[in-house]
Image (cartoon, helix red, strand yellow):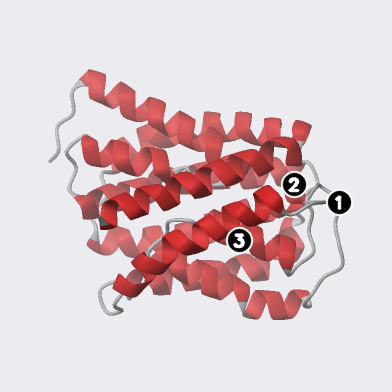
Amino acid sequence: MFDLSLELLLLLIAAGFAAGFVDAIAGGGGLITVPALLLAGIPPAQALATNKVQGAFGAATAALSYARSGLVDLRTQTGTALIAFAAGLAGALLVTAIPTEALRYILPVLLIGIAAFFALKPGLNDADRARRISPALFAATAVPLIAFYDGLLGPGTGAFFMLSFVMLAGQGMLKATAHTKLLNFASNLGALIAFSLVGEPLWLLGLAMAAAQIAGAMMGARLAMRIGARVIKPLLVATSTALALRLIWQLL
């Protein structure tokens, strides 16, 4: 049993709120919560499992907020979400069977590339564009690949989904954010089920942080829907860059 002081608990709850706010707009909430859980002295596997508990609630809240505003049709996206759920579950179950060292070296490069793309590409706004691939092909390729990665490793999943929705599905920034949160929730939930079997999450702490995540996610989604690409783009660039730098620091 892990014991936390009241001060540390309040700090973790505050981290959950901040993560929910940032994650609802641009992803990357784990940048805040995972280091906070580790600094609290929680073992890495248990910290990752606990992070999935509170992260699933935040992603679900953001996805529902966007759906209520008509940015995501949950009925037509159910099949895609189920694919993401199954792939996230599979990735988490196979985390000990698949070598991931090479990915840890490639990830920072990919994330910096994504940050540069969103920072420098002109014309990225909330307007939809022509699709490059059909919805069925997108659901059969990009979705399971990214969701499997979410269960396997996780960092940068939101950025990868965003890039795919913008470049392949032809969605504007706000719509891409909305769909990213739905699939992020589905893959998170699948990974959480797997982690709960082997990672022993701290459920009470995870649920306490989840309450704060929900509040932060509601505020973040509301801001994103009001301002759109003007807030999503810079925050996505910032979180992708920060995550890349953190991964490089860990490697060094």
- Residue type, label 2: Leu
- Circle on res. 161: 3
- Residue type, label 1: Ala
Rendered position, 58 above or below 107:
above
Q: Residue at x 24, y 42 (%)?
A: 38
Residue 1 relative to residue 106: left or right: left
Residue 97 relative to residue 157: left or right: left
Task: Judge by depth and name the residue closer to the eye, 125 or 41.
Answer: 125
Residue 213 appears at what percent x and percent y? 48, 35
Which image quarter: residue 210? top left
Which of the two discs, 2 and 3, labels the residue nearer the N terminus?
3
Q: Residue at x 54, y 37 (%)?
A: 22
Mark 2 lies on residue: 174
Rendered position, 49 above or below 8:
below
Q: Residue at x 66, y 75 (%)?
A: 139
Q: Residues within 10 Å of mark 3 (few under 14, many from 20)?
A: many
Rendered position, 68 above or below 102:
above
- Circle on res. 127: 1
Q: Residues within 10 Å of mark 1 (few under 14, many from 20)?
A: few
- Which residue sits furthest top? 7
SS type, badge 2: helix
- Residue type, label 3: Phe
Q: Are marks 1 and 3 in contact (CB under 8 Å)?
A: no
SS type, badge 1: loop
Task: Judge by depth and name the residue closer to the eye, 32 or 140.
Answer: 32
Gap in angstroms between the C-alphas marked 1 and 3: 17 Å
